[in-house]
Image: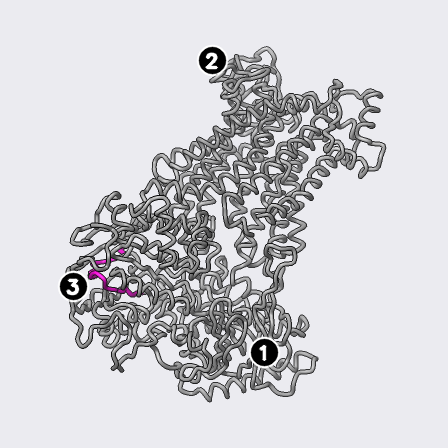
Amino acid sequence: MGWYIGRRLLQMVPVFFGATLLIYALVFLLPGDPILALFGDKPVSETARATLTAQYNLDKPFIVQYLLFLKGIFTLDFGQSFSGQPVIDQITRAFPVTIKLAVVAFVIEAVFGIAFGFIAGLRRGGIFDSTVLFLSLIVIGIPVFVLGFVGQYFVGVKWGIVRSTVGGDPSLVDLLLPGTVLGALSFAYVLRLTRNSVAEGLSADHVRTATAKGLSRPRVMTVHVLRNSLIPVVTFLGTDLGALMGGAVVTEGIFNVPGVGNLLYQSVIRQEGPTVVSVVTILVLIYLVANLVVDLLYAVLDPRIRYV
Amino acid sequence: MSEPTTGRHAQPGGAVVRPGQERFVAPLEETPLAAVDAVDESAPTGGLFSDAWKQLRKRPIFIVASFIILVLVVVSLFPSWFTSTNPRFVDLSVALQGPSAAHPLGVTRGGTDVYARLIYGARASVSVGILTTIMVVVFGGVVGALAGFYGGWLDAILSRIADIFFALPLILGAIVLLQTIKSRNVVTVALTLALFGWPQVARIMRGAVLQVRSNEYVTAAKSLGLSRMATLVRHVVPNALGPVIVVATISLGTFIAAEATLSFLSLGLPPNIVSWGGDISNARATLRTDPMILLWPSIGLSITVLSFLMLGDALRDALDPKGRTR
Amino acid sequence: MSPQNAPSAPVDRSKPLLEVRDLEVDFTSGGRAVHAVRKANFTVYPGQTVAIVGESGSGKSTSAMAVIGLLPGSGKVVGGQILFDGKDIAHASHREYVSLRGTHIGMVPQDPMSNLNPVWNIGFQVKEAIEANGIAKGAAAKKRAIEVLGEAGLGDAARRYRQYPHEFSGGMRQRALIGIGLASRPRLLIADEPTSALDVTVQRGILDHLDSLTADLGTAVLLITHDLGLAAERAEHLVVMYKGQVVESGPALEILQDPRHPYTQRLVAAAPSLASRRMQSSHRAAIVEQAEVRAEQVHEQVAAATPVAVPDAPTSDVIEVQGLTKEFVIRGAGVRGEKLRAVDDVNFAVRRGTTLAVVGESGSGKSTVAQMVLNLLPATSGKVLFDGVDITTLDRKQQFAFRRRVQPIFQNPYGSLDPSWSIYSSVEEPLRVHGVGDAKSREARVRDLLDKVSLPQSSLRRYPNELSGGQRQRVAIARALALQPEVVVCDEAVSALDVLVQGQILRLLNDLQAELGLTYLFITHDLAVVREIADDVVVMQKGRLVEHASVDQVFTSPQQEYTKALLEAIPGGSLQLGA
């Protein structure tokens, strides 16, 4: 197990450097004036230009720029937004909200996804299975922002069940609708993954042997079928945390949830390039950490991995 | 004839045969003896792909999805067959007017015809989707095939590079890149999506190639003196293509959705290109009063993405190696 | 009835424990019913071992699974009765079956690798069987589980209890599965090919153990097997199934000595463990002579084609292996990794026109030797001489020429043909790669090859998934012969096939050898097969060559302990049959 963790950590290192370098290069190494790019369509004042040049060390060689950028990441110094606020302050303020939202979305997709997927898998080919499979396909097919607007219009505007936009310091109830929208796509994936994995598990030899031992059906289905099916599902759920962050850009934007996604959304709309780069970098780092956690979780779930 | 020594037979001299265990020989005519391992010459012939086709033809989900996709392609190629209204023609005097004979789906706030924009918007979505998928399949497919087949350091390097690109979620990566690109059009958007989309295809291809590579027919090809490259191209890639086709089909839908999302964030196609994502974004302002203006492009977009997903789902059942009769 | 029947409990041994009457099982596939079992009858008495013998698809496993209510997929009992202890259980409810399984009817499955749940430790999986059947709970169940593991022949049971399946060898897993099957002291144990996935020596140990355990406990055993020799050795009553029907049943020895149904006769004749001699192709000497003539021709061609110095005349030892050694680095927990000597200083020679069998159990290094002879794997040290030339020194062009003269046939009939290529393309490929003839002459050659392996011409347009395992193997033989090689390396070429098909392929290989003067290097784990095809035998164990002798010597007077153990382990070997 120790070796496994060590190897994973080691593999993480080049990916970390590679990914941060990639982000940095995308902004600063492409042909054209990076400062103009960061400002979008807005006019660039001389002082702003000087500030940005200093912040990104654009007068230094590229590799130095990148290393200083890395240093900024490690010291949590992400520079300032155009309004003069440190980006890290904005992020720390927005973060708790996003975590709350992600938790809501995560619980919805995990609980309902696994439950529905389990039942569908047990009754493969039945009416429940076919219905749920088709509905999940539709959920996957509808882009998240369309789902957001439809939800906002019907639940928020037309029926008036919840507030259509969230605003500052939301409660868990406020986040129910955006959380559902955010988790919908992954819910459908979790459902299908669980369903396939359970359906496949049902025909596994060891499940037949468990039945032959004289175990009751509920016990076989939970202890032997579901337990084994959870391995790929949990793996997916872990990596999905990263996707939730990405999806949050749109969802938080639509519902005006003051989280990290919204911060990114607003920065994109206002064309605040430096903030976009910083927020994306942080989200990617979170994504990488989530991946690592999944790998470790995988080792816990599957004893075969521990000794490799 | 000597007596057996094994314990269970310890019933010397003419064992007592118990009821139900008397000697029984089935009459021959009941189970005529067939020749050992004869080829059933009457069975129809067909390869893997023709088998898959036979199976697909009977699936309603496949027929429906293919039909929608066919319609979409025709609409994108010849939008003028379906409407004579110019989607960019602005008539502010009828802005936000409901459906009428001249404007079957109404008019947007900006005074353009909703139906015409719905028709013309298909082209942007479909072309970005197809273009991105082609690039992703070609590049990701080649990288995955080389990494999986040659293994060793080549695999290590290519896989790490793929990991790095994989660490940037599609939308996030595209946001960073597109905000720095000023001249956005179908090609640049497709290129951006492909840049962050190829590792998935590469991973799938690599996995499939690894699986195929261990087959004995690959070793047999080597023992024939076939070169490594020829083995890869002739024997390995064709058999590893199934899962890639499935993922490519599904990804096509995902890329279309991603393009719309980016256009919605005003980072995708510029306003002068008619696109569903952009129209949805523009219709936000009138969501409370005229939701249908937002709904039409949303429906178009969702049906398009959905049909590619359905097609991928049907293909998975037909092409997935697990489902093949062995 | 208490589940913990002591063997001494008064059991009426004259009343049948299990009576299967006119059993019919159907599977539905694509809306059509397929009759997997038709009107099958058999009876098992308490404490008795009854074997059902048949090939794959004969319905033997399906019949047994119907008894324990575990028919797979769409399988359904559509007729007849299954009387267990006098009660019909053919249509018993879920509940009734749950109380029957484990306590009254136990099962030992076929493949030890896939039949234990990989995510739970062994102890957990034994303990839950004990608890589910109400024998003990909690700490008592754990204590009992450890006893069960010990009983099944696993040493240090307390430690084994905590281990996971992947830490067990195949034999150990099968012992754990036997422990689980017998944990609740069932009166009937269904053993479905319990050892066919294991090495022969391991197989024998486990079967002996199972025999003595069930004898002690008074458990009746319904043994499902494809191996007639094994069935006859272990069971007193035999049931032979063919195409879903019982074609013959009766006392084991009687059937063996006097098979009456033509199918049984065929099976007895083909059973490799019972058969006697090398299939005599009447003119052995002529084959060798022909092989040498052919070698002379090829030799001249090669000498003409390559400017490199070639020995003056073909050698009579077409392949010579000298001090061949192969080390693998195992990637394990550790930076360096350990070295494993898969092949350790092996020496042998293969005479032209003869068959040398390399025999060994899993891990003996026999397949690694084959790979090195085929020049697919570089040797760590030592040499492989082909026709007097060290094959590792060949340049690209010579290597290409070498490939033409040595061809392989592999084990897995499902993996040895490219599924996306038609049979025609597969067989033609070698000709195309080596630029032999034009399209028309190649087609004629392919048709001729198909005749040689007795496949109808109509199979040319077919794809591998439409052919059976034996037919695919024949295609693989045709492909291997396309280039008219001198040596064919058969790596477990018949191991995956049913007995009758196996016999057929072996005969085909023998005939082809006679016709074309081929030399075979025949890699196998199955000593019984060796007797039918080989002239000389090399026995390998853990990478080392243990014994090298002629077939007759090996079978009549084996010199080494290991060879003797292998011979004794051949199931049915102890049985003597009347002429």
Tag 2: residue type? Gly
Return the mark for residue B20: 3
Q: Secondary structure at mark 2?
A: loop
Residue C213 drawn at (x, y percent): 31, 62
Residue that label 1 marks: C321
Instruction: For label 3, count other residues whose C-alpha is less than 10 Å away and answer few (under 14), some (14-19) or many (20+).
Output: some
Count of labels shown?
A: 3
Q: What stretch of residues is rendered in magenta?
A: C35-54
Asked whether, in this view, residue B183 is left or right of residue B142, the answer is right
Q: Is residue B254 magenta?
A: no
Tag 1: residue type? Val
- Please tell me which residue is depicted at 35% across the width and 56% down the height of the picture: C179
Q: Secondary structure at mark 3?
A: loop
Residue B205 drawn at (x, y percent): 57, 49
Q: Is the residue under label 3 in contact with that under label 2 (CB below 8 Å)? A: no
Residue that label 2 marks: A160
Q: CA distance from mark 2 to mark 3?
A: 77 Å
Q: Is residue C43 magenta?
A: yes
Residue C300 drawn at (x, y percent): 62, 84
Seen from the viewer's position, the closer of residues C99 and A242 is: C99
**Which quadrant of the structure image shows residue B77?**
top right
Seen from the viewer's position, the closer of residues C55 and B247 is: C55
**Which quadrant of the structure image shows residue C555?**
bottom left
